[in-house]
Image (cartoon, coloured by chain):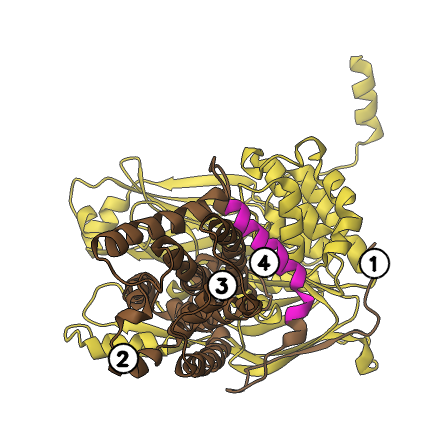
Chain colours: A yellow, B brown
C-alpha cells in the first residue's frame, strides 16, 4: 500500500517501530491473577514485597500491548484502525494522543492534534451547557476566543438552544451526548483521532456526525478512526490497518482489511476468546469455538449462488463445578448472523447431558450444518450455554465463516440487499405452447 | 471557522529522557483551560451553599475565636500585645494558603483520573486549578482581616508592602509540597490519609495559634528551621508589626521555598509520564 509516497512534507503522521510494554503482576497462590499495575508500577511492587506477604509471591510478566508498529499517514487521509478487543487499538490511540508514552519507537505528528477518546471528557453535571462547552473545548486544546466564535454553531448543532444555561444534569441523555459531540465535531485540528465515539447517540445524529467527519477529510485534514463497525470503516476510510495482538496484521484497502479482520475472527482460540465481552453466570465456561466451511464434494452446477457446502462448528469448554451434576439440564445454542447483525437462524442442541456424562467436566460438542442455503458472504456465530433457562455463558460474534462465491458464476459480488437465503430453484424458458395453454386458462 | 496557526508544529512522541525541561510555553498555551478548570472548582465548591463565600471567613474566624478563648483567655498565653483573636486570624491566612493548597490539590490528580486517562494537556494544570480556589479564599480572608484591624483600631505600617510577598511565598511553598504529594498519591493512596494528619501536627510547630514568644530563647534557632515559621511570622509582622520575626526565619523560609518548589517540580516531571498507566 503506497498512497503518494511523495515528499516527507505530505506526511501527517509517521510511526516508527512503536511499542508499548505493560508489566503484569501475578499474585501466585491466589486463584485469580491480578492484572494490576503495568510498567511504571515499580514502587508499588517494591512496597508490597517489603511488607513481605510471605504467601503471595509476585511474579512479573511483560505484555506487549503494541509491538513494532510502523507506518505513515499522508496528510488528508482518512485511516481506519480495526482489530479485536485487546488488539492494541486503544493503546495506539493513547500514544498518538500523548496520554501514555511508548516503551519503544517514535511517532512524529505534523500539526495540531485533536483526540476524541471519549465524548464529553471533563463534562460536569453541575455546570451549565455553556460552561461545559468552554471547559470541554479548552480541554480539547481550543482557546477561549476560538470557542466564542463557534459557540452558536455548537449550540445549534447540538439542538439545545433552550437549555444552554441549564445544568447538564437536567439534560436528557440524548441532549447530553449531542452537546458533547457537537463540541468535538467543531474542533478543527490538522489531525483528528477518534476512538469509537460514534456508537453513541441516535441514528440520525450519528449520520450527521459521520457527514461532518467526511467533510473534515475533504478539507485535507487527516483523520485516524477506530471502529468495530466495518460499515463505517468501509464508508469513511481510504485505508485501513488491522491490528492483531499488538502488531499490524494488514494494511490496505478498507474492504480487504474488513476481510482480513473477519479471517482473524474466524479462528478464535481460547486465548483470544478471553478478550470477548460475555454474559451469563459463568462467563468462562466456553473456551474454544471453531468453525469451518466445508465445500461440497460435488458442487451442483447451478446458476443461482446456491452453495451445497456445509459448516462444521466445534465448541469446547469446561463446566463450572455446580453444573457437573446430573440434575443439570444443559442446552447449547448457536445462532448465525449476517454481517450487519441480523439473525438468520438458531439451532438448539438438547443432548448436551449425554456429552457431559461421557467427558466429565470438559465438554466438546459439534454441530454440522448441512447444505446451508445461504448466499455467499461472511456469517457470524453466537454461542450460548444454558442450564434450565438460565444463561451460563454467552458469546457474541465469537467466530465466523465465509461461504465462497462458486466458480463459474457470472457475478462475483453478492449484494447484501439480496438477503441471506438462497433458494434451490430451477429456471426455464417458457415454450410458446405452454404460453398458449396459459392464455387459454384465462 | 477557527483560525489555523500557520506553521505546522511537529510533535515527537517517544520515551522521555529521565531529565527534561518543563515546557512552560505549552502550559501558557493552555492558560484558558486553567481558567475554566479553576472556575469549575470554585463553582462546585460553593454550589448549593446559602452562605457561599461567607464560609471562607466564617471557618477561620470560628477557629480563631476558639483558640483565643482557649489559649488567650484560659491559658493566658502571650500574644505580642495584640488581641489574641487578631493574632490567630492573621496567622491562619498564610497557613491556610500553605495547608489548603496541599489539602485540596494533593488529591487532585487522583480525583481527575478520568481526564488524565482520556486526554492530553499539561498535567500541571490539574493541581494548579485546585489552587485557584485557595487563592480566592485567602483574598477574601485578607479583606476580612483588614476589617478586623479597623475594628480593633490597629494601624497599618509601611511593612504592609511586604504582605503580598509572604502570601506568595506561602502559596509557592504549598505548591511545591503539593506537587510531591499529588504525584506520589497516584502511586500510593496512603498519602491521602497521611496528609491531613501531618498538617495537623505541623500547625503546632508553626506559630499560628500561639506566638513565638512562647518558645524559650535557646530553642528559637531550632524552631526557626521550620520554613513555615517564617511565612507566618513574616505575614504577621507585615500586617500587625512588632513581632519576633528573625533573620534565621527568613533564611529558612527562603531555603524551604526553593527546595520545595524544585523538588516538587522534579518529582512531578519524572512521575507525570506514568500517570495514565497507573491511575
Residue at x-position 47% and y-position 60%: B113
Which-is-in-front pick, marks 4 and 2?
2
Could you tell me which quadrant the C terminus of chain A lies in? top right
CA distance separating discs 4 and 1: 22 Å
Which-is-in-front pick, marks 1 and 3?
3
Asked if marks 2 and 1 fall on the same chain, the answer is no
Q: Residues within 10 Å of mark 3 (few under 14, many from 20)?
A: many
Q: Residues within 10 Å of mark 1 (few under 14, many from 20)?
A: few
Residue numbers of the magenta segment: B27-44
CA distance separating discs 4 and 2: 61 Å
Main structural element of the magenta stretch: helix, strand or loop? helix
Q: Quadrant of residue A316?
A: bottom left
Q: Is residue A91 visible?
A: no
Asked if marks 4 and 3 fall on the same chain, the answer is no
Using the image, name the chain to which the residue with label 1 belongs: A
Q: Residues within 10 Å of mark 4 (few under 14, many from 20)?
A: many
Kindly identify which residue carries mark 1: A218
Instruction: Identify the element where label 3 is drawn.
Output: helix
**Sooner in the amino-acid sequence: mark 4 or mark 1:** 4
Using the image, name the chain to which the residue with label 3 belongs: B
Q: Are marks 4 and 3 in contact (CB under 8 Å)?
A: no
Which-is-in-front pick, marks 4 and 1?
4
Q: Which mark is residue B239?
A: 3
Instruction: Identify the element where label 1 is drawn.
Output: helix
Kindly identify which residue carries mark 4: A117
Kindly identify which residue carries mark 2: B217
Q: Decide: is A368 above or below B100.
A: above
Using the image, name the chain to which the residue with label 4 belongs: A
Instruction: Identify the element where label 2 is drawn.
Output: helix
Amino acid at each position: 500500500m503506497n498512497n503518494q509516497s511523495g515528499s516527507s512534507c505530505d506526511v501527517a503522521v509517521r510511526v516508527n517501530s512503536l511499542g508499548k510494554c505493560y508489566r503484569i503482576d501475578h499474585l501466585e497462590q491466589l486463584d485469580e491473577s491480578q492484572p494490576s499495575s503495568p510498567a511504571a508500577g515499580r514502587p508499588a511492587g517494591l512496597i508490597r514485597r517489603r511488607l513481605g506477604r510471605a504467601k503471595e509471591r509476585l511474579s512479573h510478566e511483560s505484555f506487549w500491548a503494541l509491538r513494532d508498529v510502523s507506518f505513515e499517514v499522508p496528510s488528508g487521509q482518512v485511516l481506519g484502525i480495526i482489530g479485536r478487543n485487546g488488539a492494541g487499538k486503544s493503546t495506539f490511540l493513547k500514544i498518538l494522543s500523548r496520554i501514555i508514552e511508548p516503551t519503544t519507537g517514535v511517532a512524529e505528528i505534523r500539526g495540531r492534534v485533536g483526540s476524541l477518546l471519549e465524548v464529553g471528557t471533563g463534562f460536569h453535571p453541575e455546570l451549565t451547557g455553556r460552561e461545559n462547552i468552554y471547559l470541554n473545548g479548552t480541554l480539547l486544546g481550543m482557546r477561549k476566543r476560538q470557542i466564542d466564535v463557534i459557540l452558536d454553531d455548537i449550540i445549534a448543532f447540538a439542538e439545545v438552544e433552550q437549555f444552554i444555561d441549564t445544568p447538564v444534569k437536567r439534560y436528557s441523555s440524548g441532549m447530553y451526548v449531542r452537546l458533547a459531540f457537537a463540541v468535538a465535531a467543531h474542533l478543527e485540528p490538522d489531525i483528528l483521532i477518534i476512538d469509537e465515539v460514534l456508537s453513541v447517540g441516535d441514528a440520525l445524529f450519528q449520520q450527521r456526525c459521520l457527514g461532518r467527519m467526511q467533510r473534515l477529510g475533504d478539507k485535507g485534514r487527516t483523520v485516524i478512526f477506530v471502529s468495530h463497525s466495518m460499515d463505517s470503516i468501509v464508508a469513511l476510510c481510504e485505508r485501513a490497518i488491522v491490528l492483531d495482538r499488538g502488531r499490524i496484521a494488514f494494511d490496505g484497502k478498507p474492504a480487504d482489511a474488513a476481510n482480513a479482520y473477519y479471517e482473524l475472527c474466524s479462528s478464535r482460540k481460547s486465548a483470544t476468546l478471553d478478550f470477548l465481552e460475555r454474559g451469563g453466570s459463568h462467563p468462562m465456561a466456553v473456551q474454544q469455538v471453531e468453525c469451518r466451511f466445508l465445500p461440497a464434494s460435488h458442487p451442483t452446477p447451478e446458476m443461482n449462488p446456491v452453495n451445497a457446502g456445509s459448516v462444521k462448528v466445534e465448541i469446547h469448554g469446561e463446566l463450572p463445578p455446580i453444573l457437573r451434576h446430573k440434575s443439570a439440564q444443559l442446552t447449547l445454542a448457536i445462532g448465525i448472523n449476517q454481517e450487519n447483525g441480523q439473525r438468520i437462524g438458531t439451532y438448539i442442541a438438547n443432548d448436551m447431558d449425554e456429552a457431559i456424562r461421557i467427558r466429565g467436566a470438559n465438554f466438546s460438542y459439534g454441530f454440522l450444518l448441512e447444505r446451508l442455503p445461504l448466499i455467499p458472504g461472511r456469517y457470524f456465530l453466537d454461542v450460548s450455554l444454558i442450564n434450565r433457562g438460565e444463561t451460563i455463558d454467552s458469546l457474541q460474534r465469537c467466530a465466523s465463516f465465509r461461504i465462497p462465491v462458486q466458480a463459474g458464476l457470472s457475478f462475483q459480488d453478492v449484494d447484501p440487499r439480496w438477503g441471506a437465503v438462497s433458494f434451490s430453484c430451477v429456471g426455464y424458458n417458457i415454450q410458446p405452447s405452454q404460453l398458449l395453454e396459459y392464455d387459454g386458462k384465462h | 471557522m477557527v483560525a489555523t496557526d500557520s506553521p505546522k508544529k511537529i510533535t515527537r512522541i517517544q520515551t522521555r529522557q529521565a531529565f527534561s525541561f518543563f515546557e512552560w510555553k505549552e502550559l501558557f498555551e493552555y492558560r484558558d483551560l486553567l481558567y475554566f478548570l479553576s472556575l469549575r472548582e470554585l463553582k462546585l465548591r460553593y454550589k448549593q451553599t446559602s452562605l457561599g463565600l461567607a464560609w471562607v471567613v466564617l471557618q477561620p474566624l470560628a477557629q480563631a475565636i476558639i483558640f483565643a478563648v482557649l489559649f488567650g483567655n484560659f491559658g493566658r498565653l502571650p500574644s505580642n500585645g495584640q488581641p489574641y483573636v487578631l493574632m490567630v486570624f492573621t496567622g491562619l491566612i498564610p497557613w491556610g494558603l500553605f495547608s489548603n493548597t496541599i489539602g485540596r490539590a494533593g488529591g487532585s490528580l487522583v480525583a481527575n483520573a478520568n481526564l488524565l486517562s482520556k486526554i492530553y494537556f499539561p498535567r500541571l494544570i490539574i493541581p494548579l486549578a485546585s489552587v485557584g480556589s485557595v487563592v480566592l479564599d485567602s483574598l477574601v480572608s485578607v479583606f476580612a482581616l483588614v476589617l478586623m484591624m479597623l475594628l480593633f483600631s490597629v494601624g497599618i505600617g509601611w511593612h504592609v508592602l511586604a504582605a503580598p510577598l509572604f502570601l506568595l511565598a506561602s502559596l509557592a511553598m504549598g505548591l511545591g509540597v503539593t506537587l510531591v504529594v499529588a504525584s506520589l498519591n497516584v502511586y500510593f493512596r496512603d498519602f491521602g490519609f497521611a496528609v491531613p494528619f501531618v498538617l495537623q501536627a505541623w500547625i503546632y510547630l508553626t506559630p499560628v495559634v500561639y506566638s513565638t514568644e512562647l518558645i524559650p530563647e535557646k530553642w528559637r534557632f531550632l524552631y526557626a528551621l521550620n520554613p513555615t515559621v517564617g511565612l507566618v511570622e513574616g505575614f504577621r509582622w507585615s500586617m500587625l508589626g512588632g513581632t519576633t520575626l528573625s533573620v534565621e526565619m527568613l533564611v529558612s523560609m527562603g531555603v524551604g521555598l526553593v527546595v520545595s518548589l524544585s523538588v516538587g517540580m522534579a518529582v512531578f516531571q519524572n512521575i507525570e509520564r506514568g500517570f495514565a498507566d497507573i491511575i
